[in-house]
Image: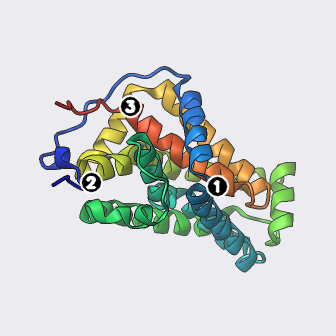
Amino acid sequence: MQQPDDTHKESDTPTFPTIRDVKAGAPFRWFAEGWQDFKSCPIPSLFYGFCFAGMGLLITFVFEHAYEYTSGLTSGFLLLGPFLAMGLYEISRRREQGQSCSLTPTMTVWRRNAGNIGIFAVVLGIVFLIWARASLIVFALFYTNEMPNLTGFLQQLLSFENLEFLMVYFAVGLIFATLVFAVSVVSIPLMLDRNQDAISAMLASVGALARNPAAMITWAFCIVAATLIGFMTFHIGLAILMPLVGHATWHAYRDLIEPLNHG
């Protein structure tokens, strides 16, 4: 009897991943391949995209007059992105293997390696909470103006008012963002595709960053640019850009990690 498509026999005894070298311009190819996934599977991709957009809009509307909280939650949005994009990784994997673009199987893909994905989610959650607390502390110590609403805050950012606050806030944010980016480059795709343990997956992500700094800097810049464009379009752009990033992440994983031998 034929085995189900979602069964990964190759993952019974996972070994530490072999990291490959990629060119600095590789992220642009990942985005091009991700766009092909999006066009081939638009409905499930947009479902996840609208989930991202809905989260962004909810954060903005609920905390419009307490932007110190919105900043922390928006940062958390970036932290939790790799976890929330699991369905998009699965869409790309299924298309790669010639399977259907059904939405339903992608919504429970976490069950494939629930324990290790749970560990990774806890790690991201802890970092998110620390980042949100750090955001509040930076606001309390360095924000000298009256707390504005969302529009006022953005105006101050664009006019470079309160420069000391901006420098400290973005420096702290960069530290946390770099940490999260380092451990999440290929971690979840690895855990989904090979049943990899969380620690090895995070170490492989750090190794991919260390081995390919030019490509990873380009990749990080592309992700940040896509996210900023999404926010600047009142989160509507996230409906397309976040699925694109998610699909591209799967192709980044395929490019950065040496595939297992298939007999």
Amino acid at pointer 3: Leu
Label 2 SS: helix
**Picture coordinates of residue 45, whole percent (x, y):** 58, 55
Q: Nearer the viewer, mark 3 or mark 2?
A: 3
Classify residue 86 as left or right of residue 201.
right
The reply to whether the C-beta atoms of the residues labelled 3 and 1 are less than 8 Å apart is no
Q: Height in image: 129 above or below 89?
A: below
- Give me the disc on residue 169: 1
Classify residue 170 as left or right of residue 7.
right
Q: Nearer the viewer, mark 2 or mark 1?
A: 2
**Picture coordinates of residue 247, whole percent (x, y):** 52, 45
Q: Which quadrant would the N terminus be assigned to in this image? A: bottom left
Label 3 SS: helix
The reply to whether the C-beta atoms of the residues labelled 2 and 1 are less than 8 Å apart is no
Q: In the rendered structure, which disc, 3 or 2, sits on the residue that comes first in sequence?
A: 2
Which color scheme is applied? rainbow
Q: Height in image: 185 above or below 42?
A: above
Q: In the rendered structure, which disc, 2 or 1, sits on the residue that comes first in sequence?
A: 1
Classify residue 58 as left or right of residue 111.
right
Q: Which residue is mark 2?
A: 198
Label 1 SS: helix
Closer to us: 197 or 90:
90
Q: In the rendered structure, which disc, 3 or 1, sits on the residue that comes first in sequence?
A: 1
- Give me the disc on residue 256: 3
Q: Alpha-carbon neighbours of circle 2 within 10 Å: few (<14), some, or many (≥20)?
A: many
Q: Nearer the viewer, mark 3 or mark 1?
A: 3
Amino acid at pointer 1: Tyr
Q: Alpha-carbon neighbours of circle 3 within 10 Å: few (<14), some, or many (≥20)?
A: many
Residue 199 at least partly seen: yes
